[in-house]
């Protein structure tokens, strides 16, 4: 019987597995990089072992160090989590060779399915060889790993070379394997998958379908179970194919078989992920089981029941990312001051209040999961919970999630993988609360919490300035003779440092206020308090190229140097942040007059990378 488990992963993944281990009475061991020394997963584990360094390649992807950590900490089993080494057959063998229990499928099954190219061969599907115009559009994909890393859509033949190069570099960085392949890209398809669970005694469960069509950069954003609106008989067909794939490799443990369903209803096999998936909680909610607990039982040699539990209701999950969807999904860093959701919604997270969100790993903060008797009720429940959630820290995709869950196309079940290509602008158009700046100002008004005092003379109007949704807002208020506060067109019912109540046209509204330095949160609206007079030195010359995110410079365009002629939109630098590469392009056509970045350099957000000036002949 397993008594101690090391989780070869980090963040939300490790924290979620530790929770189940704790419920089962199993001691937990964490591994952590230097960047994660104070991370939540390292804090909640019974024991933590340091992996020196910060980059995944020198820490979480070092199988030898992870196995050594398990042995030194006295663990008797290893759970790989999902991501990093979870689909690495050599790692699984190293765990077993060290005398530890591997909570995962046999190395041979991982080997057969972990490479997407080999998995397709096993299913009788050949990847594209020489790509011609008639094959377009195509998708370049990493053979190992997932999560959207090492993936590129190619619509023009001349873009194929750059797509292959970029995908190889990203895949090598994320998975330690730069192999990529090319397959047809299905326009307007739905991403549908089947959860399987198998024991060592020949029983294989197909735990229904999941729809994961809402994706950005080929990485899932919203998932649900069961997949809604599939053609008659398709769900049963997909489940049968998934069971067949599992049996073909003598699979043991939890795994996922993924398909792309074309608009005509035909299903195309994508891959089999030989691990637990990020979206597994929706299946747990619908079937009323704990998949991690089942993984541990199977690893201990227990047999599954002949049939899985009966599915009940509908579940939906949304991934909360520290990113700005309106700025090409740019990842965000900084302090997560507070994160809470209303009761009744499951929240899986790898962060606690006050934790720092860094640049080294995936920007996902948490997963919120709602379960209800019907799909409509589950969508309403999750959208409402996210709308009322408290999220104080870097910019997130919260508003995008709420709007997506309420979007007519999604609620009708007519979504596909191109959903955000069609609707991103509408979904990210800011709609800040116009009363938020006034509430922020009144919350810090002198004497705001001492209503009822007496002032013999009316005070002069007070002015405050805030930045909100990229615009400056100036608000005015004054103290009354009775010691209260007043503002034009608004009745101030209550004003304190953490709560302001305003009445407009007879309707009272409550505003919860929190302040962290010059950053102010009024309900779900984020504002920045501005000084009375702007700083004239905080200006940049036209043509200045600022870092849109913190990260590491991984490439500089060949031959780029001060004095070089560049064209607007031409790639100049490549930054790597949160496991993704981001291309930085010239802001205008002209001459490069400054270059402040070099390969390997750590860059902070808004750092001046370069300056491009318009050529004299173009002025």
Image: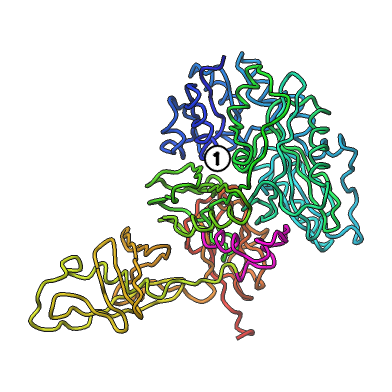
Quadrant the N terminus occupies: top right
- The residue shown at (56%, 57%) is 380
Q: Magenta span has 116?
A: no
Here the colouring is: rainbow
Residue 375 lies, in percent from the top left, at 63, 53
Residue 85 lies, in percent from the top left, at 64, 32
Provide the major secondary structure of the magenta segment.
helix
Q: Which residues are magenta?
A: 398-426
Q: Nearer the viewer, residue 397 or 317?
A: 317
Q: Magenta span has 407?
A: yes
Residue 325 lies, in percent from the top left, at 57, 62
Q: Is residue 504 left or right of residue 28?
A: left
- The residue shown at (76%, 29%) is 111
Element under label 1? loop
Q: Is residue 24 placed above or below 500 in the rendered structure?
A: above
Quadrant of the rendered structure where residue 295 is?
top right
Task: Say which residue label 1 marks.
Answer: 55
């Amino acid at each position: 019987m397993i008594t101690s488990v090391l989780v070869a992963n980090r963040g939300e993944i490790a924290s979620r597995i530790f929770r189940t281990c704790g419920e089962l009475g199993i001691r937990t061991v964490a591994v952590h990089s230097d960047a994660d020394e104070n991370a939540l997963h390292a804090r909640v584990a019974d024991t933590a072992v340091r992996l020196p360094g910060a980059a995944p390649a020198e820490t979480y992807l070092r199988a030898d160090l992870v196995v050594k950590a398990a042995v030194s900490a006295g663990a008797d089993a290893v759970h790989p989590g999902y991501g990093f080494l979870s689909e690495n057959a050599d790692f699984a063998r190293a765990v077993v060779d060290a005398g530890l229990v591997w909570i995962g499928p046999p190395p041979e099954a991982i080997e057969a399915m972990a490479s997407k190219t080999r998995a397709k061969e096993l299913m009788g599907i050949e990847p594209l060889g020489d790509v011609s115009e008639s094959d377009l559009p195509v998708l370049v994909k990493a053979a190992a790993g997932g999560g959207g890393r090492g993936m590129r859509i190619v619509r023009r033949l001349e873009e194929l070379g750059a797509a292959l190069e970029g995908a190889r570099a990203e895949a090598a960085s994320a998975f330690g394997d730069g192999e990529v392949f090319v397959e047809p890209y299905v326009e307007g398809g739905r991403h549908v998958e089947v959860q399987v669970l198998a024991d060592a005694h020949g029983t294989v469960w197909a735990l229904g379908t999941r729809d994961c069509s809402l994706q950005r950069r080929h990485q899932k954003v919203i998932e649900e179970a069961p997949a809604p609106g599939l053609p008659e008989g398709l769900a049963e067909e997909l489940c049968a194919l998934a069971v067949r794939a599992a049996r073909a490799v003598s699979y043991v443990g939890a795994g996922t078989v993924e398909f792309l369903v074309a608009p005509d209803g035909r299903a195309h096999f994508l891959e089999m992920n030989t691990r637990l998936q990020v979206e597994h909680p929706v299946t747990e909610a619908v079937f009323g089981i704990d998949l991690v607990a089942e993984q541990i039982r199977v690893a201990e040699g227990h047999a599954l029941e002949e049939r899985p539990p009966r599915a009940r209701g509908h579940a939906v999950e949304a991934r909360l990312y520290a990113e700005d969807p309106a700025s090409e999904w740019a990842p965000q860093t900084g302090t997560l001051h507070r994160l809470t959701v209303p009761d009744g919604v499951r929240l899986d997270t790898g962060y606690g209040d006050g934790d720092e969100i860094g640049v080294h790993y995936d920007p996902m903060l948490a997963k919120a999961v709602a379960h209800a008797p019907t799909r409509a009720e589950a969508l309403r429940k999750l959208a409402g919970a996210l709308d009322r959630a408290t999220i104080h820290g870097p910019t997130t995709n919260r508003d995008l999630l709420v709007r997506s869950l309420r979007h007519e196309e999604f609620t009708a079940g007519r979504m596909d993988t191109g959903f955000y290509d069609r609707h991103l602008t509408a979904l990210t158009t800011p709609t800040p609360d116009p009363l938020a700046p006034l509430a922020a100002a009144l919350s810090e008004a002198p004497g705001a919490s001492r209503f009822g005092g007496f002032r013999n003379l009316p005070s002069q109007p007070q002015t405050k300035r805030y930045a909100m949704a990229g615009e400056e807002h100036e608000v005015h208020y004054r103290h009354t003779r009775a010691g209260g506060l007043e503002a034009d067109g608004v009745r101030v019912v209550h004003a304190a440092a953490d709560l302001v109540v305003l009445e407009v046209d007879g309707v009272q509204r409550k505003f919860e206020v929190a302040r962290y330095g010059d950053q102010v949160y009024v309900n779900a609206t984020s504002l920045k308090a501005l000084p009375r007079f702007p700083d004239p030195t905080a200006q940049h010359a036209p043509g200045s190229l600022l870092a849109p995110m913190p990260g590491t410079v991984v490439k500089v365009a060949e031959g780029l140097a001060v004095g070089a002629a560049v064209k607007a939109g031409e790639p100049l630098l490549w930054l790597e942040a949160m496991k993704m590469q981001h291309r930085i392009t010239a802001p205008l056509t002209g001459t490069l007059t400054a270059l402040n970045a070099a390969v390997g350099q750590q860059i902070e957000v808004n750092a001046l990378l370069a300056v491009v000036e318009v050529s004299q002949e173009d002025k």
